[in-house]
């Protein structure tokens, strides 16, 4: 069976190469060196239970791929294996073998049993990659620029899905699914769309052992194929508004990639709507950017600036693009979600019309909007610290971990039974935290020190840790520790009775509020008002956001990007434009307040 061939950037003419040749972005060609077939031998091993992915296996692989697997001559993928040491010596620098939870032979699990996370202040980029690796959120895929989302990382995406899917349905939208392969001729119908996306396209030129009559685009976004179907589904005003959403993967041939933030393939949702009037479409686009802002702040704990994109930065094919911009821990901006007012651009290209109540034929007015797995990257970079993740409780796959502490087998049975009772009590408390049950994990792993377990769950950002030992058992109490406050966040002597679930729910809300407040304080303290171009350059150089009056041309905006690396992130909706005088760059009047910064 001949493989599919992915081609990027070279749109016409299409090279007629053998199916083993792949043409990548920029027209560079690489021989695959091998073909994959159904008869290939693949060795498999038993799949561990899901809980083992949350807790971390004793042995895990950390992959760093520096080139595409399609290039056998230049591929250099290195794999480092980390493994806990066994025996009386424990792990890391721990030379004693009798201090662990498992008794005299228990040794394992010191701080060095897990790979050390680079401090954020030392190297933010490496810190980010370390956290993703050690918290087991994702691994590099075999093809350069791809990633494998591991169960713990996918659980974060599921938290986003659960909330947004409910909100989409509450606002009248229904889920659908459109094909991943799109005829190339569809992409070319809307001029600005093809111009904006052509460098990022991946094309399939062969299938079934033959060259295709028309190349197929691997979905970069779905406006074109959605309109092809809308033109068949919509006949009259009675069919409007048409409100659909799809959860899907998309491919964009990015040259500079970063896990979760920018990869060749990523997960997202994309909403597509059609309306009878321009006003209805504009209202829809504004409503959905509001839903994204609501999720970012109330669930992800990530404060955002909501605003309108400039002509240079808006979506290819849109009349207007609205955005939520978040500040990461290094001061860079992250475009965390967008909503587009498409006007009638795609409707005219695909002749998507309807019969109005007046009896006249008219083109529909449309919107599209989406968020992706880059939101997961945003949560990491907004809240994380030197110990690893700090997850907002509403996003956290595990909200509470219960850790029993004992010295030997004589204490173990009673303390573990007590910890199990606390776990069951919390799980059985009903929907007490934002109309959902508490997500609780009991860490009863043997042969691991309490300190190792504490570090393990801190790295994974679990918001609340409950510690119980023999003295707590005697008192009928426990210790409740907050991840966001370190040692100061410990509350001793919390009684284990019917009040415990409510107390835990209160602490979770405190963590949720605290993370949002800290992120907002950091953001607001790093936005600087400017009135001259020199001031903007100084602010950007310092790694902050520059806010000032702007009335420059598209070319002048691009020039600022070339000279400073900063882009115009948005014109904030909540800005007081009455205070804006002349543009700090061009000197023109009628300026709007805009934010410039470096970004991901």
Image (cartoon, rainbow, N blue to C red):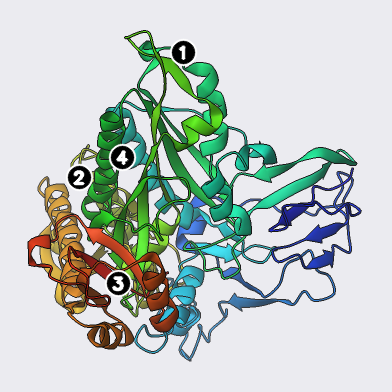
Q: Secondary structure at mark 3?
A: strand
Quadrant of the frame with the N terminus: top right
Of residues 166 and 526, the one nearer the viewer is: 526
Q: Is residue 186 left or right of residue 398?
A: right
* Mark toward the start of the polypeptide (3 vs 1): 1
Q: Which mark is residue 533?
A: none
Tag 3–tag 1 contact (CB < 8 Å): no
Disc 4 crowd rating (10 Å Cα; few below 14, some 14-19, many 20+) is many
Give me the residue at 32% from left, 62% from top. Answer: 462
Q: Position of residue 171 (x, y in %)?
A: 28, 30
Mark 3 vs mark 4, CA separation in Å: 23 Å
Instruction: Report the residue marked by disc 2.
Output: 433
Mark 1 vs mark 4, CA separation in Å: 23 Å
Instruction: Report the residue marked by disc 1.
Output: 235
Mark 2 vs mark 4, CA separation in Å: 31 Å
Tag 2–tag 3 contact (CB < 8 Å): no
Q: Secondary structure at mark 1?
A: loop
Q: Is residue 582 above or below residue 165?
A: below
Q: Position of residue 386 (x, y in %)?
A: 34, 80
Q: Is residue 347 left or right of residue 404?
A: right
Mark 3 vs mark 1, CA separation in Å: 44 Å
Instruction: Report the residue marked by disc 4.
Output: 285
* Mark toward the start of the polypeptide (3 vs 4): 4
Instruction: Report the residue marked by disc 3.
Output: 596
Instruction: Give the number of the mark in front: 1 or 4.
Output: 1
Q: Secondary structure at mark 2?
A: loop
């Amino acid at each position: 069976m001949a493989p599919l061939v992915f081609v990027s950037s070279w749109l016409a003419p299409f090279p007629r190469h053998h199916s083993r040749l792949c043409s990548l972005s920029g027209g560079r060609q690489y021989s695959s060196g091998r073909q994959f077939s159904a008869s290939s031998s693949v060795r498999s091993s038993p799949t561990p239970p899901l809980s083992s992915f949350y807790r971390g296996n004793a042995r895990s692989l950390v992959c760093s791929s520096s080139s595409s697997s399609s290039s056998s001559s230049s591929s250099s993928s290195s794999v480092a294996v980390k493994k806990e040491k066994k025996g009386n010596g424990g792990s890391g620098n721990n030379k004693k073998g009798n201090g662990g939870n498992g008794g005299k032979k228990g040794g394992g699990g010191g701080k060095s049993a897990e790979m050390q996370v680079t401090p954020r202040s030392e190297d933010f980029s490496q810190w980010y990659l370390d956290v993703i690796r050690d918290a087991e959120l994702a691994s590099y895929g075999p093809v350069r620029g791809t990633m494998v989302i591991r169960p713990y990382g996918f659980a974060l995406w599921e938290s986003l899905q659960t909330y947004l899917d409910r909100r989409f349905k509450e606002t009248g939208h229904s889920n659908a699914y459109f094909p991943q392969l799109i005829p190339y001729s569809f992409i070319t119908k809307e001029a600005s769309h093809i111009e904006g996306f052509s460098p990022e396209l991946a094309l399939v030129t062969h299938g079934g052992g033959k060259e295709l009559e028309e190349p197929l685009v691997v979905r970069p976004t779905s406006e074109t194929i959605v309109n092809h179907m809308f033109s068949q589904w919509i006949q009259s005003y009675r069919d409007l508004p048409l409100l659909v959403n799809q959860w899907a993967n998309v491919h964009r041939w990015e040259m500079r990639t970063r896990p979760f933030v920018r990869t060749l393939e990523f997960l997202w949702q994309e909403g597509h709507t059609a309306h009878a009037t321009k006003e209805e479409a504009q209202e829809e686009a504004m409503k959905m950017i509001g839903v994204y802002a609501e999720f970012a702040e109330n669930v992800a704990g990530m404060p955002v600036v909501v605003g309108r994109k400039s002509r240079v930065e808006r979506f290819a094919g849109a009349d207007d693009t609205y955005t939520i911009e978040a500040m990461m821990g290094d001061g860079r901006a992250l475009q965390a979600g967008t909503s587009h007012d498409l006007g009638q651009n795609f409707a005219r290209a695909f002749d998507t019309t309807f019969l109005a109540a007046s009896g006249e034929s008219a083109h529909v007015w449309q919107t599209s909007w989406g968020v992706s797995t880059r939101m997961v990257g945003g949560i990491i970079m907004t809240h994380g610290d030197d110990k690893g993740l700090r997850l907002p409780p509403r996003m956290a796959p595990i909200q509470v971990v219960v850790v029993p502490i004992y010295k030997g087998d004589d204490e173990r049975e009673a303390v573990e039974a007590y910890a199990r009772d606390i776990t069951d009590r919390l799980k059985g408390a009903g929907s007490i935290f934002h109309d959902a049950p508490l997500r609780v994990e009991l860490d009863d792993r043997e042969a691991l020190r309490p300190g190792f377990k504490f570090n393990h769950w801190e790295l994974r950002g679990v918001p609340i840790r409950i510690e119980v030992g023999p003295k707590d058992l005697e008192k009928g109490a426990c210790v409740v520790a907050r991840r966001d406050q370190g040692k100061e966040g410990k509350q001793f002597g919390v009684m284990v009775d019917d009040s415990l679930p409510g107390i835990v729910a209160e602490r979770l809300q405190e963590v949720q509020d605290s993370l949002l407040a800290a992120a907002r304080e950091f953001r607001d303290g790093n936005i600087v008002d400017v009135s001259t171009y020199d001031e903007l350059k100084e602010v950007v150089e310092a790694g902050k956001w520059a806010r000032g009056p702007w009335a420059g041309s598209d070319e002048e905006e691009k020039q600022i990007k070339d000279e400073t690396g900063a882009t115009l992130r948005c014109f904030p909706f909540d800005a007081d434009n009455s205070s804006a005088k002349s543009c700090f760059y061009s000197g023109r009047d009628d300026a709007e307040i805009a934010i410039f910064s470096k970004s991901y």
